Amino acid sequence: MKHSKGIVNAGASIAVKIKTMAISAKQMLSRTKQLKITKLREIVQEELVKDETTLKLLKEQDFLEGDIYGNGTLVKYRSKNYEIFKARKNPLAGGAVDLIDTGAFVDAMKLNKGKKGGFKFGNTDSKRKMLADKYGTDIFGLNQDVFNKYQKEIIAPRFKAKIRNILNK
């Protein structure tokens, strides 16, 4: 049996090499018509939402390290005494703002689909507005480097498998 190779670009920098059985051009055209950019984005979104717990853990890790913006910027507390208290409570953050005290804020995080296919965390905790006003809405963002690695290692293989399934029907 002959195999043909095709490449599908998901618009999210995910290239997919597809091996399909030899089929007619008409059949391949029919199958590829199913792969509109909206469908490709939908597939990626489904995978991200399905893995919300993992993404939440990645965001929590940023907080634990005192990287509340997910970009390596550490914010110090105004009170030196509170900074010392927090450094003892969470040595990993070294006294930097970690947005973790009881864990309720992190527990209340949920993944929201943003504009243009981007994702940010929302939050239902009562401290949400106060923390956003104090530290800005960037506290709800994902660390882009971590997210890119996650997308490449976890999401891309799943995405490729789903595309193969569509094209091999």
Image (cartoon, rainbow, N blue to C red):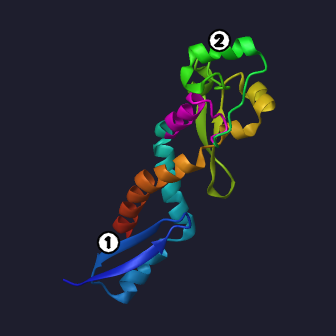
Residue stretch in magenta: 55-70
Q: 119 or 83: nearer the eye?
A: 83
- 11 is higher (above) or lower (below) than 74: below
- Say whether residue 53 is left or right of residue 129: left
Q: Which residue appears farthest toward the bottom when viewing the image?
A: 25
The relative height of residue 24 versus residue 42 in the rendered view (above or below) is: below
Q: Horizontal and vertical percent for residue 166?
A: 38, 68
Residue 91 location, x and y as percent? 55, 20
Residue sitting at 60 percent across and 24 percent down?
94
Mark 1 belongs to which amino acid? Asn
Image location of residue 48, percent across then percent down: 50, 48
* First reached walking from the N terminus: tag 2 or tag 1: 2
Residue contact at pointers 2 and 1, CB within 8 angstroms: no
36 or 130, which is in the foreground? Answer: 130
* Residue corresponding to mark 1: 168
Does 80 sit left or right of 86 as displayed? right
**Residue 85 - label:** 2
Place of residue 81 in the rendered image (x, y in percent of width and height, measured from the top left): 72, 11
Res 130 → quadrant: top right
Q: Is residue 130 left or right of residue 91?
A: right
